[in-house]
Amino acid sequence: MFRASDRHALTGGLRIRGTSGSLAWGHRTAATFRTWSIVQLKGVWTLTATLDRVERLYVRQSKLLFTAPRGKGQYWCWPVLDLQVNDTHTRLRAHLGLPEQ
């Protein structure tokens, strides 16, 4: 599921990691992840992920949401501000907005 550490060892920022997650565009799945990591440093949330599956059309749309299971029926949810997918569509890096409550 996920693992949250209080402080990232090198930067002092918050780090959250997980083994499953996805990008949603409305009710559609734009991408699914094998693993992901979010680091919050100086107010900026940055997501890096290993992609399992990507829908190339959907992942280019605006108003994407990153979601991941948090445990006990709860989910993490962040709006995606911008993202980059590598040429082989296996890795993703994105800047996220504030987590939704």
Image: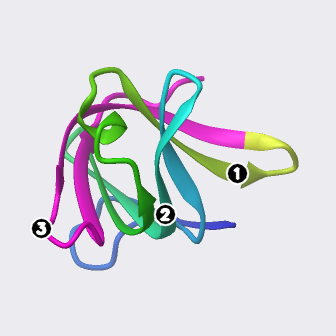
Q: In the image, residue 91 lies at what x, y percent?
A: 27, 69
Dot 2: few (<14), some (14–19), or many (≥20) neighbours within 10 Å?
A: many
Q: Residue furthest right?
A: 72
Tell me which residue sits at (59%, 25%) in the image: 27
For badge 2, the amino acid type reads: Phe
- Magenta stretch: helix, strand or loop mostly: strand
- How far is disc 2 from disc 1 in space, using C-alphas? 15 Å
What segment is highlighted magenta in the picture? 75-101
Is residue 71 shown in magenta? Answer: no
Residue 2, above or below 67: below
- How far is disc 2 from disc 3 in space, using C-alphas? 16 Å
Q: In the image, residue 93 lies at what x, y percent?
A: 22, 57
Residue under label 2: 33
Left or right placement of residue 45 versus residue 15 in this view: left
Q: In the image, residue 50 lies at what x, y percent?
A: 38, 72
- How far is disc 1 from disc 3 in space, using C-alphas? 30 Å
Residue under label 1: 70
Q: Please report whichever mark, 1 or 3, sits nearer to the chain's N-terminal start.
A: 1
Q: Please report whichever mark, 2 or 1, sits nearer to the chain's N-terminal start.
A: 2
Q: Are marks 2 and 3 in contact (CB under 8 Å)?
A: no
Quadrant showing the C terminus: top right
For badge 1, the amino acid type reads: Arg
For badge 3, the amino acid type reads: Asp
Label 2 sits on a secondary structure element that is strand
